[in-house]
Image (cartoon, rainbow, N blue to C red):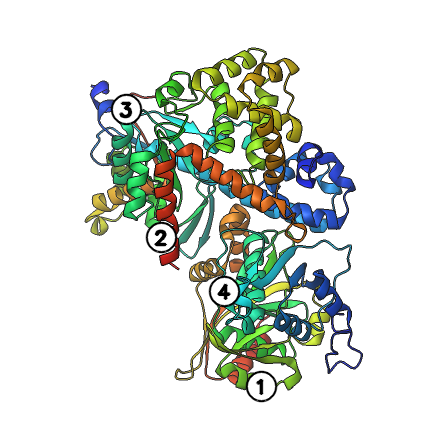
Amino acid sequence: MIGDVVTGDKVPELATDGARALRRGSFCFRVGPFTARVQTSVPTLRRDLLQIYAEYPLAAPEDLVDFSIKVAHTSLLRCWVRPKVIADTGFANTPFVPLPEDLSVLAFEMGLNWLVGTTADQFLVFHAGLVARDGRTVVMPGASGQGKSTLTAGLAYGGWRLFSDEFALLRPETFEFHPYPRPVSLKNESISVLGSRVPQDRFSRIYRDTPKGTIRYLRPPAQSLARSHVPARPHLILFPEYNPDAKPTVEEIRKIEAFALIRGSVVNSDRLGPVAFDTMCRLTEECPVFRLTYRSLDQGIAMVEDLWERLP
Amino acid sequence: MTGSRLVRALRNPRELTGWSLPEWSALLFEARYAGVLARICHDLREVGVRDQLPAGVRDHLTAAERGAALSHTRVTWELDRLRRVFEGTPQKFLLLKGAAYTVRELPWAVGRLSSDIDVLVARPDLEKVEAALIHAGWEPARADNYDQKYYREWMHELPPLRHPERHTVIDVHHTILPPTGRVSIDGAQLLEQARDVDDRFMVLSDADMVLHSAVHLFQDGEVRGGVRDLLDQADMIRHFGQDPAFWPALIGRADELGLGRALYYSLRYGQRLMGAPVPDQVQADARRFGPPAAVCLLMDRLVAAAIAPDYMFERRTGAGLAGHMLYLRSHWLKMPPMMLARHLGTKAWKRVTSR
Amino acid sequence: MAESRKSRAGITPGKTEGTVWTVPGADQFKVREFDTISLLYDPRSAETHLLDAFSREVLDTLTDQPRSIADAIRALTELVPDDARDGLENRITSLIVEFDRLGLVYPVLEGSA
């Protein structure tokens, strides 16, 4: 493991395999089905990576590297005066913008997300939260927003296996979702909501003044990471909406609308063409699809669990 | 010249079954960067070894093939839409580059990623074609006044036309090189020798197809990462060269159009780097198009360094500079020096203010 | 007569009499139905289209047999109850214009192969 942790609660300092690998520029670790290689000389990022990814499996030197990411200062001058960093995946036409050095880990996360969203076409990729129980999944499609990530994190620390809060990966040939567990990015109020139910050492430090406000990363539960090579079947599709002012509702969605919503959440339907069409139709046909409106995290979790119990 | 990892993979896909995963990690990156990963997938299928490869590698190949399949669909569909606009009219189009290879189903049409369509029409037809496309829904892509002016006055094509729903681009040319360059070609010469594919579309003659690709790589635009263009030329040589009449036509046409220098480089590097089977006699005949020995030596080094990309964790420091030098040389060939200073100056200024 | 038709720039549906419309891509379409709506994936364009019951009927009519707009109107009018025939011609014409725009149907000029 990256952190080489024996006791499991404190991340040791630099004398670890991970730290050594980072310094050499060959820090490779597994995230679900992928091996990511990171190179950076930014000390903040090195510290953050070692803490946040402490429980992720370190990859072996002879493993296939799926994604390569560098995070470096934007210019030599920038090292000293309000230093900025940027992700480099080696390709042109990327949408990355420079970020303050303190937010280097965000640059890394963006780089990795971009690579998954643009080159992982062996999967049908959804913007969605995804959790599982007993080999079956609840997928919660939707654009990046507070509701989805918070609910996913709440379920993950409520006994469900975390697959992802960001991207759901479905292999069309087997019709199974594959875990892609990333640190869950929690913003603003969600931090305190989860903070009251999850031990502090599961969180990263605080990142302020990010483009989306204040952020903390919540590390996936250790058991989720330990089983991140085990896929699960589609079972329930939910479109959750957090609304503290609205009456809580559970509403089944008509199939045709469900298809449109599902398709809207797929990142690479164009590139998968007919395979995407068949797979999305199959999901629509085989899985019940609901819209959920909830007032609080507790209520949202309870509603999901209730729906899960009621389904055949 | 020893081949880089990527060049070795392109020349002999069979040997890839013996590669280690770290070698594959680097190759996957390089091939993707150069836009040839889908092509390598195809080659592996052709020689029947794809299924012997590790599962992780096969996932990358699947992903690359899917991207290429979409690009192919986009190109053929765009041509379908172009046909529809001009249905019932006598307008014909000479297809260039990828669209031409695709419509003729040539071997190097496989695995391409661009879905832009390049067409050439007679200069008098330019405005009417542009008007018809705009009427049918295409929009000029560049909104900036300066670039519009640059395009219409100095370049060999209209400003690109973009379709707002499909996000595809059609480039309408009247010739293949900018008229202000040191070498210029009249589109009519190309049209004269073009071959019909059907009643709407034509393609360049075999010789012109090679010359166009060569000129695109060695005189027009950036050269860095041009491994795919050189690969295309090697494929064309392999494919067209089977007909003995092709070679004298190629040399003669290069003379006629003044494109001997580009052909010289294409034959030289096509053979040295990509293993293109150029007959010795042809290399000898092409020698007179070559540059002075000193320039040739410099080009040998620059091209080898710039043509194939390096895995980002193994970058050789030479490649960046080599790429830049070749880019400046390309622009130098495009526009006379005074105009070039003004154009580059304006572009740099725009980049500074728009940050 | 054929010459003067061909020299007109382009073909405008509804304005060129005698134009017959066909659906050459029909063999390749992937169609699934949910409720009364049809999802149609056209692999030639990589587009997914949503057709309500009536649109589907119009497309099927042209698929069964290439027809001019006038013929399609005749065939479909018979299927529709009297009280729903108001504005039917316009609806069918606009649908065929839309299908043309989406590349689902193609015009065949009178007198051409």
Badge 4 crowding class, 10 Å Cα cut-off, few under 14, some 14 to 19, many 20 or more, is: some
Q: Give residue B297's quadrant in the image.
A: top right
Q: In this rendering, is residue B107 above or below A212?
A: above
- The numbered dot on residue C110 is 3
* Marks 3 and 1, how far apart at CA: 73 Å
Q: Is residue A75 left or right of residue B335?
A: right
Could you say whether the residue bearing mark 4 is in a helix, strand or loop?
loop
Q: Earlier in the sequence, mark 1 or mark 4?
A: 4
Question: Which amino acid is tagged 4?
Answer: Pro
Disc nearest the viewer among 2 and 1: 2
Report, in whole angstroms, how far the alpha carbon at label 2 lies from the one at label 3.
54 Å
Query: Which x, y percent locates residue B300?
Result: 62, 32
Q: Quadrant of the N terminus of chain B?
A: top right
- Depth check: give the residue in front, B54 or A6: A6
Q: Which residue is mark 2?
A: B350
Rendered location of residue B126, percent (x, y): 28, 30
The secondary element bearing badge 1 is classed as: helix
* Pair 2/4: label in front: 2
CA–CA distance in space, label 3 to label 4: 61 Å
Q: Nearer the viewer, residue C47 or A10?
A: A10
Q: Label 3 amino acid?
A: Glu
Residues marked 2 and 4, same chain: no
The type of residue carrying mark 1 is Gly
